[in-house]
Image (tube, rainbow, N blue to C red):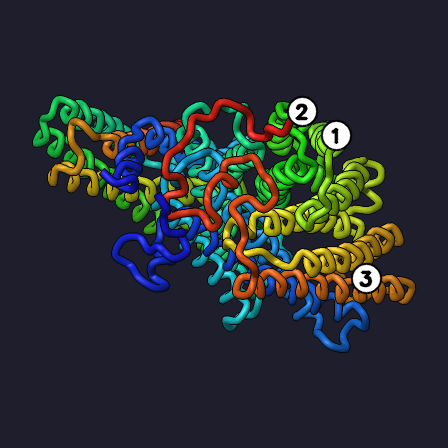
Amino acid sequence: MSIQEAAAVVRERDYVGAKMGMWVFLFTELLLFGGMFLLYSVYRSKYPAAFHKAAADLNIYLGTGNTVILLTSSLTMALSIAALKKAETKRSCLMQFVTISLGLVFLVNKYIEWSAHIHHGIYPDSAVILAMSRGEIIFFSLYYVMTGIHGLHVIVGAGAIAVTLLFTARGKITSGDFVKLENAGLYWHFVDIIWIYLFPLFYLIT
Amino acid sequence: MVQESFLSADEGRYRGIFAWIFSTDHKRIGLMYLAAILSFFAVGVTLGVLMRINLIDPGRFISEKTYNSLFTVHGVIMIFLFIIPGIPASLGNFFLPILLGAKDVAFSRINLLSWWLYMTGGIIVVLSVFLPGGAPDTGWTFYAPYSIRTGSNVSLALFGVFLLGFSSILTGLNFVTTIHRLRAPGMTWFRMPLFAWSLYATAWTQVLATPILGITLLLLILERTFGIGFFDPTKGGDPILFEHLFWIYSHPAVYIMILPAMGVVTEIFPVFSKRTVFGYKAIAFSSLAIAFFGYLVWGHHMFTSGMSDTSRIIFSLITFLVAVPSGVKVFNWIATLYKGSIEVDAPLLYSLAFIFLFSIGGLTGLINGTLSLNLYIHGTYFIVGHFHYTMFGGTGFGFFAGLHYWFPKMFGKMYSERTAKLAWVIMFVGFNILYFTMFILGLQGMPRRYFQYLPQFRTNHIISTVGSWIFVTGLIIMFGNLIVSLFKGKKASPNPWGGKTLEWQIASPPPRENFGTIAVIDHGPYKYD
């Protein structure tokens, strides 16, 4: 084995290093959302009454449904890793597929929610919203921005799992080398956790 | 076994330029960063000189609007394209794995991705200058609400900087993992060269601070595109919050800029005084302390923006605390030189200039951090003088010191020592004429970023501009010397300075795989006795 190959093998197999890189990356994602949570907390303490009033406009059933969907998808993601560790490739692929599908259902719900608001003329800079109080303007902007950027993360996460699904099916991710799948799983759980915070902050504060 | 140098040995299936721009070799990526960073630096310097030329006789050469764009683009390029990536992405990428005894960084493909993001971001920033709409004119700080209202290409520039931030995060993430996972056998944390320690502190700051900038700039883009109103008072938003979010990143970013330069000179002092570095652990921990305190002082940029007195006193106090670890470093460097057998070569001269200029920058920083004085000098040329002394006198000279120190290793060629020293003298003189005058202008009350000024400031403005010409002459001689040496320099030996760290134990330029075999490390990095 040449030195180059030996180095490549050492690099590919550094399980701890790969996990560490992912965790550090998740810190950065957390801080990215942290900036928005900071804005949320400042504006909520500034306009508590308006936030309560505006939150009543959100559809709590769709929000709860989406929470259940995302939590279930985290479960299926974890199951896919457990299956792969037992070398049950097919079941792992199925579970990853279910995870992606649940992610897509989440996005469809989000689409229904957003389009209902937009249909009522509630979106940033619209005539309807500019007629509202300042606190309500900020609430809805926060709602669109935070759930929008979260939605982007759902899309990225589903894309990442689509890649690991392909890799698992082709035998590039195996029961002996599954760190890519675990990292995609970590990312998915992170997206889930962010939603766990968004849900009460927007839907349950009335 | 003699291996081919990384400069000539192509890896994989690519040839020619593709063997560079698709290379995952940390040394090639380091050199590509170096070339790109120095090119952007040349653009930034040109813009700076144009500003100085305007200030000889405002309005004669340059219009008001152009001047606003000049100081904005000068700032954006110098901060985000030169100083922040400067040392870590170029010298750090090249030398960190070698100093640790590794073959590459932990994630070599992500390393290449970060270079591509850097180039894309850089090109977008440059495009924002030339596209219709006009160059950004907000100042590099993009303060709301003006940045929301101006019609210039601010959104494009913001997106460019967003990508640069992403690139910076990936570099930081890579370095943290590399230092944790890829140290050679026997290289414990306290046997790491101190440059690696400073990069470690920098990398954490890059990772933990940059996302805040990312989201802030993203929100500003959304603000301009959709009118979300977070920073717009007419919609219930608060522009001061933009300042907070901006400085929560941008103050730690100051330490992203200076820490690697401190690491570079820490490598240089022991080698040119042939003494073990004084107070290894103190220097290592002071890097971490600077990075830590750096998070907690952002408010000192906003003393006059509107903050409670309690917060201002706390921010001022913590600002003073940052001076302690910085002072620890300066005293340790001096103590390293004490009783050493000093060889006054170019890298040492540039490092000494670093100590001198950085000390002036640091001490004037304490003046800025004093609440009562800050009210008087806030937003004047005093601030401009202060941050050019720390950033350019500090990081800039540290970078040049590193370039001269590692040039023979990177390219296998020696430069002309005499010319390097000549350039150093000219730059040192020019620098002080250019920027020290700004302290005086600031104390006299000249506000920064103003296009026009009262007649009593004229003499000092002319002195400062003449200084900029001297300084640029020195820069041209220095870079000319290095570029000529690339082609005509004498062949460098593997260890021209008598260094003890790992990079000097291998050929110049390093072979493709860095090390044939890695010896087990059983002692600290600076073993002179």
Inter-mark Cα distance, 3 to 1: 34 Å
For mark 1, give the secondary structure: helix
Check the picture and name the quadrant holding the C terminus of chain A.
Answer: top left
Mark 1, residue position:
B335
Q: Position of residue B388 (x, y in %)?
A: 72, 51
Mark 1, chain letter? B
Residue lying at 26% horizontally and 27% vertically, measured from the top left? A71
Estimate how packed mark 1 is, as few (under 14), some (14 to 19) or many (20 or more) residues with alpha carbons within 10 Å.
some
Say which of marks 3 and 1 sits in front: 1
In the image, what residue type sits under mark 3?
Ser
Disc 1 and disc 2 in contact, CB within 8 angstroms: yes
- In depth, the one of B138 and B167 nearer the eye is B167
Please tell me in which quadrant of the rendered image residue B282 appears: top right
* Alpha carbon distance from label 1 to label 2: 9 Å
What type is the residue that disc 1 sits on?
A: Ala
Q: Which residue is mark 2?
A: B279
Query: What is the number of the mark on residue B464?
Result: 3
Q: For this rendering, which residue is in front, B35 or B297?
A: B35
- Chain letter of the residue beneath label 2 in the structure image: B
Sequence order check, earlier mark of 3 and 1? 1
Let me know if marks 1 and 2 both belong to one chain: yes
Residue type indicated by callout 2: Gly
Q: Is residue A199 visible?
A: no
